[in-house]
Amino acid sequence: MQISSSPFQLIESRKKRNFVIKLILYLTLLVAARSIPAYQELLDKFTGISSLHGAILFLLGGNILISLARISVVRFYMRKAKDERTHGNFLLGIAWISNILNSVIILISIMLAFDIQPLEFLTGLTIVAAAIAILTKDYFTNVINGLILMFTDQFSLGDTIKIGDQTGIIDDITLLNVVIKKDDGQRHIVPNNLILNTQVTNLGQLDHKNIEFVMDITHDKKLEVERLQELLEKRFEQEIKDGKILTIKPKLMEIQKDFSKIKVTLEVPMDQDPSVESQLQEFLLKLSHGGY
């Protein structure tokens, strides 16, 4: 029986093919410059073409080295890590680092193509670079925090997390922010600094979750917490036996002049039946109107 490849393996296979193509092109240009007299004469005669040729070789050579390092690291990691849930984070981090290094290679290649010495150029920009670093301190902090998120197993793509009162699925992790997709389809962009400096609950690593519903009971209903507990256990007796509800607990939150505020918490499995929540709300709504 033929085993289908995972999405990560397919991506890596495509990148390996691109690596081979770049390697062949690099070797072709290198051999042509050293072995073909007509090509050598062309490079010697036109300095612009010679500079462009050197820039292309530097670009391809740097890209090949980065790709080779990335392929080696990813291959080693995927052999060690059997849990594909964490592959997305790691490959995302490696991809971003590769993109940053390739951007530097491209910038240097452009300088070489125009006969600009990179070291002299960077030396002249030292003071300007220091000022830019100060002004973009928060930006670089976000980038570093993004890399930390990518290379740790605290969060993974597809995990459901809760930040404050916002709950959603991690749709993407970038160098600047985390994109969270909520149940209504809206996407919220949360800066990486906020993710690492705020209490975040990773619901994707839990085997259960809580459903909460707050209700107001007027004093004339004379519904005590103990009585509410009995009514809830009787109403959801079958769901508790079937394991759809793990625990059910009402709690008195606040007492006002005319009513009491009660919070009912259901502890349910992560893959619980969505109808349980609507059944709880419907039952508590009836209770609040005296239907017990």
Image: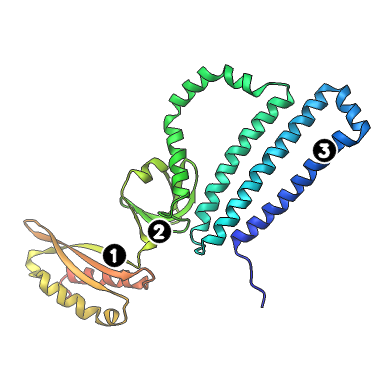
Pointer 1 or 3: first along the chain: 3
Q: Which residue is mark 2?
A: 160
| Residue at x 58% of width, y 54% of height | 74
Q: Is residue 197 left or right of residue 147?
A: left
Q: Which residue is mark 3?
A: 29
Measured from the top left, where is residue 192 in percent x and y? 42, 43
Task: Tell me the number on the disc at residue 210.
Answer: 1
Q: Amino acid at mark 2?
A: Thr
| Residue at x 42% of width, y 54% of height | 155
Secondary structure category for the residue under label 3: helix
Res 134 → quadrant: top left
**Neighbourhood count class around disc 2 (C-alpha, 10 Å): few under 14, some 14–19, many 20 upward:** many
Res 168 → quadrant: bottom left
Secondary structure category for the residue under label 2: strand
Pointer 3 or 2: first along the chain: 3
Q: Is residue 47 left or right of residue 265?
A: right
Measured from the top left, where is residue 60 in percent x and y? 72, 39
Q: Quadrant of the C terminus?
A: bottom left
- 52 and 220: which one is in front? 52
Q: Amino acid at mark 3?
A: Leu
Q: Contact (CB < 8 A) between labels 3 and 2?
A: no
Q: CA distance from mark 3 to mark 2?
A: 50 Å
Q: Is residue 229 left or right of residue 60?
A: left
Q: Amino acid at mark 1?
A: Asn
